[in-house]
Amino acid sequence: MIDENIRKISKILIQRPSIVILTGAGVSAESGVPTFRGPDGLWRQFRAEDLATPEAFARNPGLVWEWYDWRRQKIYNVEPNPAHVVIAKWEKYFPFFVLITQNVDGLHQKAGSTKIIELHGNIWKVRCTKEGKVFENRQVPLSQIPPLCPDCGSLLRPHVVWFGEALPSDVFEASLQALYHTKVMMVIGTSALVQPAASFPLIAQQNGAILIEINLEPTPLSSYADFTIYGKAGKILPLIDQLLSEESEEKIE
């Protein structure tokens, strides 16, 4: 039995409105990406909040890089799940489509997504602390900790946004432009607690977008959403996509 909200959402999406999708850690968790925050995310005696900061890196870059090297090893062989696959497929279905993700694991790209804004960076990229150049680095494990810039020999840092750091201005501006233009805002697998991403759905809604939330449990966003479906994105998105395919075939006939 397909949830009635899923049917209503498919009726909206079959019109191919402009759409922005915001994804969070819940989507990656369905692929088996470990949780690196909270009580179950301890590494040695450290919490993620103690390591993912500019201050921690300045104090002990080797320690921070050991943690990121461990994280990279943990997710290296992780594969996209059906939610990632459907989102990548929809990129070609909707004339206006933007994916905004809070995840740094690169699984959306691995599934085939290209129209993507990475709010918090990418764990497979590194940045020179002197010149600001960004490099892709998929070496697992790292041959040198901490790694050094191949061009100038300066220290490299993970190309991610740490606690206490602002989003890059171009990333923030691109996100806002997408939110202003979209007619549907779909929020998937995010706690809706981390700012500024938590405010993005409401910005879109205030500009006239229909707000759809898919999550395992209620969030601060749930009371504002036009549609809320509780469950795994890897099961819900394929159901919506199935209905879209069926309705598209009916239109053709």
Image: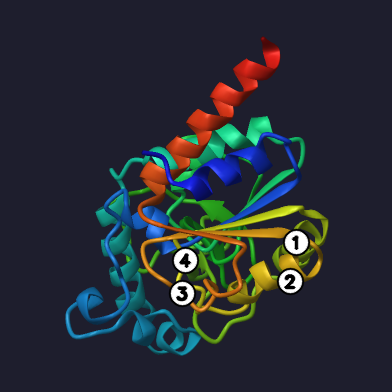
In the picture, the disc for residue 179 is 1
- Tell whether label 1 touches label 2 (CB within 8 Å): yes
- Name the amino acid type tagged 3: Thr
Query: Given contact means CB atoms under 8 Å apart, are the residues at marks 4 and 1 in contact?
Result: no
Element on which disc 3 rests = loop
Which residue carries the number 2 mark? 203
Which of the 4 image quadrants contains residue 43?
Answer: bottom left
Spatial CA span between label 3 and label 4: 8 Å
Residue that carries the numbered disc 3 in the rendered image:
219
Position of residue 36 relative to residue 249, above or below, is below
The residue wearing badge 4 is 190
Crowd band around label 3 with a 10 angstrom C-alpha radius: few (<14), some (14–19), many (20+): some
* Cα distance in 3D space between marks 2 and 1: 7 Å
Q: Amino acid at mark 4?
A: Thr
Colour option used = rainbow
From mark 2 to mark 4, how far is it between C-alphas?
Answer: 16 Å
CB-based contact (under 8 Å), mark 3 and mark 4: yes
For marks 1 and 3, give the one nearer the viewer. 3
Residue at x-position 70% and y-position 48%: 19
User: Is tag 3's residue or tag 4's residue first in the polypeptide sequence?
Assistant: 4
Please report whichever mark, 4 or 1, sits nearer to the chain's N-terminal start: 1
* Residue 246, horizontal then vertical, whole percent: 55, 22
Secondary element at image label 2: helix
